[in-house]
Image (cartoon, coloured by chain):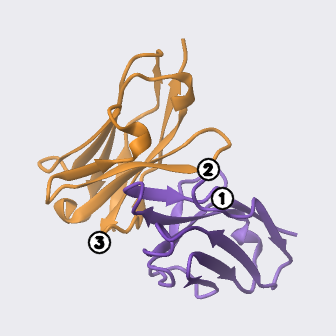
Chain colours: A purple, B orange
Amino acid sequence: QSVLTQPPSASGTPGQRVTISCSGSSSNIGSDYVFWYQQLPGMAPKLLIYRNDQRPSGVPDRFSGSKSGTSASLAISGLRSEDEADYYCAAWDDSLSGRVFGGGTKLTVL
Amino acid sequence: QVQLVQSEAEVKKPGSSVKVSCKASGGTFSSYTFSWVRQAPGQGLEWMGRIIPILDIANNAQKFQGRVTITADKSTSTAYMELSSLRSEDTAMYYCAGGLGGLDAYWGQGTLVTVSS
């Protein structure tokens, strides 16, 4: 199983706000930045959020990230059909001396 | 705009090795960090390791210690990932990702490696 824990699925209707959680420990989320990736079906992942809450240029401000202690969250507001994708959190793990990912959350827009 | 172009799909026999390339264009290659991430069919993302060409420093995930070698050729702006002693469980899409400050801002299109006898 993955070092970071995410719910396997999430869903929402267009326009809604959804939140995806990511739980870790003191050796990863608790001591380093959290990153979020979006993977559309059949595509390579895309960096969505870096350093907990920063958006790369081109990422809509509907996407926001936050971190508290050993947990982090990705929020998507004004949900759109094109947001249907897999979302992954990631962080550096000091104990493993490597980056670790969450298992991914499949977001369905109903 | 930075672009990462990976080598073509490969089919390998168990026990053999595969070397996947990732050619960068449009950016300052040496200043970037390049990571390798793989995804088995229907599964999540798995970090394999990274390299910082300007420092010539590479580190790998513990799971792949002794089996993966990540290198970079600054003269051709190409990063490489070689995985040895292949087994069926290594069948996956392999991605390279790069960016400044360790951010995986740019991703290659992926290289499918199939391990089959």
- Residue A27 in the image: state x and y as whole percent: 46, 67
* Mark 1 burial class by Cα count in 10 Å: few <14, some 14-19, many 20+: many
Q: Would residue A39 be found to the left or right of residue A13 on screen? A: left
| Residue A89 position (above or below residue B77) | below
Label 3 element class: loop
Q: Are marks 2 and 1 on the same chain?
A: no
B6 in relation to A46, above or below = above
Residue B69 image point, x, y percent: 28, 37
Q: Are the two marked residues, 2 and 3, in contact with CB atoms closer than 8 angstroms?
A: no
Which residue corresponds to mark 1? A104
Residue B33, image quadrant: bottom left
Task: Kindly identify which numbered label has been placed on residue B77.
Answer: none
Cα gap from disc 2 to disc 3, whole angstroms: 24 Å
Look at mark 3 in the image and give the residue it sits on: B101
Which residue is labeled 2 in the image? B44
How many numbered tags mark residues here?
A: 3
| Residue at (49, 57) in percent of width and height | A100
- Measured along the vertical axis of the image, is residue A47 above or below residue A75? above
Which residue is depicted at the point 55% across and 51% down?
B45
Label 3 – label 1 distance at C-alpha: 24 Å
Chain identifier of the residue bearing label 3 in the image: B
> Which tag, 2 or 3, sits closer to the chain's start?
2
Q: Secondary structure at mark 2?
A: loop
Q: Is residue B110 above or below residue B3?
A: above
User: For the residue marked with disc 3, what is the amino acid?
Assistant: Gly
